[in-house]
Image (cartoon, rainbow, N blue to C red):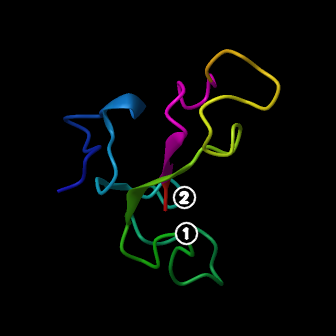
Amino acid sequence: MLANSPAQNPQPNELKPGDIVACAMCRGTGKLRLAHVHSCPRCHGTGETTIARVKCPVCCGSGRPLGYLKNCRTCQGSGWVNKLM
């Protein structure tokens, strides 16, 4: 079951690693509108992508950007962010 089915539509902070969501590139159809492309390059025609937990690109996983005393705003100091795969 897709985590962001039209009935649910979760907020980004409700998504967690391992959740399956509709592919944003093909909008869950598995195909692009371009005639020469047979399947979506992001989801490979499945219409679904997963959420992965990766190091924050702003603070490089430290929780604080270099030279700052406050927590990173992007990851809220955790050092990790969710990314669509």
Q: Which structural element holds mark 1?
A: loop
Binning the other alpha carbons within 10 Å of mark 2 as few (below 14), some (14 to 19) or many (20 upward) gives: some
The region drawn magenta spans: 72-83
Q: Is residue 76 above or below residue 61?
A: above
> Is residue 73 highlighted in magenta?
yes
- Judging by the rendered image, the residue that carries numbered circle 2 is 25
Q: Which mark is residue 10?
A: none
Pick the front one: 5 or 80: 80
Disc 2 from disc 1: Cα separation: 8 Å
Task: Find out whether the residues at labels 2 and 1 contact each other: C-beta distance under 8 Å.
Answer: yes
Residue 4: image quadrant is top left
Residue in the image at 64% along x and 72% along y: 34
Q: Which quadrant is home to the N terminus?
A: bottom left
Q: Secondary structure at mark 2?
A: loop
* Residue at x 77%, y 20% (from the top left corner): 68
Question: What's under tag 2, amino acid-wise?
Answer: Met
Q: Which residue is mark 1?
A: 32
State the residue in front, 42 or 79.
Answer: 79
Residue 19, compared with residue 63, is above or below; it is below
* Residue plotted at (38% across, 66% down): 47
